[in-house]
Image (tube, helix red, strand yellow):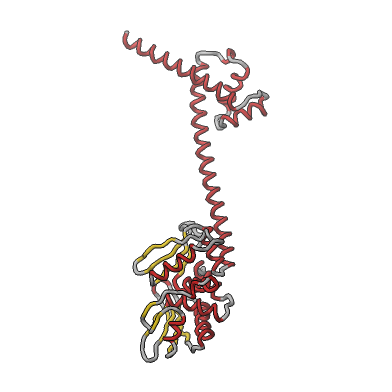
């Protein structure tokens, strides 16, 4: 049986296969390089981008070639650890890389880290986020019953994480996309834990199919949780009704051992007989049964009033029996 593709991988594949113009590819490249690249200095500098997804490797290749007229190479290596398969490497060596890295707002003169500026402009920001997510982003499978909802982007530089977080929180029409921040080992992580916010972000980065899949799975999962909670609630209510009925019947039997049923009025007599016969019904259902099946017009309050009166009489008889027993012991 073929192994199911991870949901995060399907999201990235969808994003990578969308169409982008040259300017958009530039900012996708900027986002990816900031978090998923190795840059080596030298007379002829080199750049290496790693990804486990073939379509992402093809997109990075196109970004380097179309945006900067570079001549990258793609090759792969096998990785056997943690069940992984192939890792794709997109590499390029070119003296122009120093200029390219500065133009991408990643490195100045090959070593000075730059904070994104043009990349934070609204028309470019979406594509910067796409690159960041492709490099070090993850989202859990919403269909999984073992995990909660979670989406994250990990950054290698705290200033990048904070700049992107501030920009995301400044949005008005996507104001529910409230990313939180945490430092995890050597990474700076922005994350979402609310399902509706994750759907908004997936839509924002262009993963429309994944967003609809996420929403459908989320709705089914939430409906199942609601159904389970309702079933648990119904079971608890049923157990409570049976326990209450057992106590009512004990009280009724005690009262009837002292007072013949013929001495009760018609409604009280009907409630007594119905309670003993229908011990699974709650008071509302018992009133409905008496009204519709027996022909005794009575409300839930009427049933409660009669059974409360019987309970009080039963307690009075128990006290009498207790006192009588104590008197006998003293004598």
The residue depicted at 57 percent of the width and 32 percent of the height is 281
Q: Residue at x 49, y 59 (%)?
A: 144
Residue 42: x, y in percent? 36, 89
Nearest the eye: 9 or 258: 9
Pick the front one: 68 or 276: 68
Q: Residue 199: tell me if it is visible.
A: no
- Front residue of 195/140: it is 195
**Residue located farthest toward the left when viewing the structure as drawn:** 330
Looking at the image, the residue that sits furthest to the top is 331
Q: Quadrant of the C terminus?
A: top left
Left or right, 269 with reference to 3: right
- Rendered position, 265 above or below 84: above
Please name the residue shown 45% across and 65% down the image.
Answer: 165
User: Where does the image place residue 231, in percent across and percent down from the top left?
Assistant: 54, 44
Against 288, is 268 above or below?
above
Asked if one can make out residue 57 in the rendered structure from this viewpoint, the answer is yes
- Does 92 appear above or below 264? below
How many marks the image carries: the answer is 0
Looking at the picture, how far across and down is residue 18, in whole percent? 58, 75
Q: Position of residue 164 (x, y in %)?
A: 46, 68
Q: What residue is shown at x 45% (from left), y 18% (from top)?
A: 315
């Amino acid at each position: 049986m073929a192994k199911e593709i991870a949901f995060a991988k399907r999201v990235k594949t969808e994003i990578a296969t969308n169409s982008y113009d040259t300017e958009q590819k530039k900012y996708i490249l900027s986002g990816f390089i900031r978090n998923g690249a190795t840059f080596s200095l030298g007379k002829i500098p080199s750049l290496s981008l790693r990804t486990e997804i073939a379509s992402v490797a093809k997109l990075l290749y196109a970004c380097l070639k179309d945006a900067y007229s570079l001549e990258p190479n793609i090759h792969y290596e096998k990785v056997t650890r943690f069940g992984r398969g192939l890792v794709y490497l997109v590499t390029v060596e070119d003296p122009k890389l120093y200029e390219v890295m500065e133009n991408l707002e990643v490195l100045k003169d090959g070593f000075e880290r730059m904070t994104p500026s043009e990349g934070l402009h609204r028309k470019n920001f979406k594509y910067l986020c796409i690159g960041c997510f492709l490099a070090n982003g993850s989202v859990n499978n919403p269909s999984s019953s073992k995990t909660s909802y979670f989406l994250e982007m990990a950054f290698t530089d705290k200033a990048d994480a904070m700049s992107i977080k501030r920009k995301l929180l400044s949005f008005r029409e996507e104001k529910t996309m409230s990313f939180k921040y945490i430092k995890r080992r050597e990474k700076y992580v922005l994350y979402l834990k609310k399902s509706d916010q994750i759907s908004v972000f997936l839509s924002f980065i262009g993963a429309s199919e994944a967003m609809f899949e996420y929403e459908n799975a989320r709705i089914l999962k939430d409906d199942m949780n609601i159904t389970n909670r309702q079933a648990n609630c119904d079971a608890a209510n049923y157990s409570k009704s049976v326990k209450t009925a057992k106590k009512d019947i004990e009280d009724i039997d005690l009262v009837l051992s002292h007072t013949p049923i013929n001495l009760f009025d018609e409604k009280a007599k009907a409630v007594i007989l119905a309670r003993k016969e229908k011990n699974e019904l709650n008071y509302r259902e018992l009133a409905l049964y008496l009204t519709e099946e027996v022909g005794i017009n009575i409300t839930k309050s009427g049933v409660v009033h009669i059974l409360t009166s019987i309970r009080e009489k039963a307690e009075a008889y128990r006290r009498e029996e207790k006192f009588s027993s104590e008197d006998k012991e003293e004598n």
